[in-house]
Image (cartoon, rainbow, N blue to C red):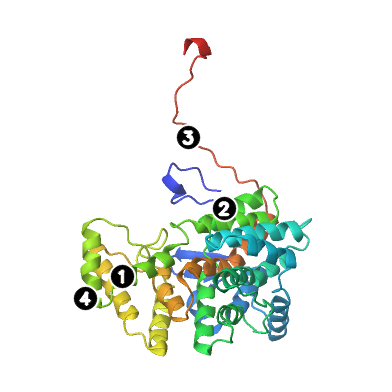
Amino acid sequence: MAAAKKTGGLAGVTAGETQLCTVGKEGAGLTYRGFDIYDLADNANFEEVAYLLLHGKLPTRAELDAYVEKIKANRGLPDAMKTVLELVPAGAHPMDVLRTGVSFLGNIEPEGNFSNQSDVADRLLACLPSMLLYWHRYHAGGVRIDTETDDDSVAGHFLHMLHDKAPKELHRKSLDTTLILYAEHEFNASTFAGRVITGTLSDMHSAVTGAIGALRGNLHGGANEAAMELISLYDTPEAAIEGIHERLASKALIMGFGHRVYTTSDPRNSVNKRMSKALADDVGNTVLYPVSEAIEKVMWDEKKLFANTDFFAASVYHFMGIPTYLFTPIFACARITGWAAHIMEQRANNRLIRPAADYVGPSLQEWVAIEDR
């Protein structure tokens, strides 16, 4: 552990060690267990990356095939879970739906003595999309969907449940790639929250529930939804340029730009930007991509702020027909792999995470009887 530093938000403080991920390291950039994010985005599928994070190595063909079948077999929801999801209000935030679903799953499928932690991780990876889409389809259209599709990928399963049909390969592959990009990111707020809970020797469901709560906040997981709301305001690049200049002049917060760790660029952005252009061409949308490019240019020219992974992910999801309010939950459906891997890593060399704080309150005071106050 590094020596304690006085810093707001723990910026620059090293809070532990991990073998899972590098973020912004000189000569490394973003890597998962030593594999560059660009190699993974170009060559891997999400299930391979999930296996890599959770098991420490890339799977063989036989191991990957068995893993895919295991994930497919774990997609189903118990009737009690479906009842709970139907009782969650239609107006609830979808992140709250996942938070409730994971917590309830911990009641009906408790982890026990942690000996089956890998199975619990795989179960959560498989059924988070099922929870989300069962609730969405029930409250959006009154449909009780079958969550046990035969799709061989989490991305295909998600889009199939959303649209009632197997997706186009470009759409499936694009969603699959975004899941890879979102899967892991070192000691971010939600992961660190999960590790703090794990450090108390709590169960995986509790740790993941806490992580979901942290990801729900707009400063961590909601930027892709805010980006979609922003780019939807403008119907031409010229209008976007004028509008962003006005927002900058009024010092309005513009989400989807800059990053707490990266200083010059987010390596994930170029991948999402490329997919956004391909999907725009595929669906025949001639507005959102050029508007997004215009906003990106203004933010760099005026503020030297770069687009982060959330900015172009917004249009990627929109072009696939995914409702905006489901964007952040998709983040959670990907990050469950990183969360679970960190939970298992924390347990392997556990120590209670309990930092100190500098007291800045009143000095020692004399007690005053209530009659004399």
Q: Which residue is drawn at 49% across and 76% down?
A: 322
Neighbor class of circle 1 (other Cα within 10 Å; few <14, some 14-19, many 20+) is few
Front residue of 238/308: it is: 238
Q: Where is residue 218 in the image (x, y as percent from the top left)?
A: 44, 57
The numbered disc on residue 358 is 3
Quick one: SS at disc 1? loop
Q: Is residue 308 left or right of residue 1?
A: left
Residue, disc 4: 238
Q: What residue type is labelled 1?
A: Leu
Residue 296 seen in the current view: yes
Q: What residue type is labelled 4?
A: Glu
Residue, disc 1: 233
Neighbor class of circle 2 (other Cα within 10 Å; few <14, some 14-19, many 20+) is many
The numbered disc on residue 8 is none
Q: Where is residue 205 in the image (x, y as percent from the top left)?
A: 68, 58
> How far apart are the two marked residues, 4 and 1, measured between alpha carbons?
12 Å
Q: Which of marks 2 and 1 is nearer the N terminus?
A: 2
Q: In which quarter of the image is residue 283?
A: bottom left
Front residue of 133/221: it is: 133
Q: What residue type is labelled 2?
A: Ala
Q: Where is residue 133 in the image (x, y as percent from the top left)?
A: 59, 72
Residue, disc 2: 193
Q: Could you tell me if the residues under marks 2 and 1 are in contact, i.e. CB atoms within 8 Å?
A: no
> How far apart are the two marked residues, 4 and 2, measured between alpha carbons?
42 Å
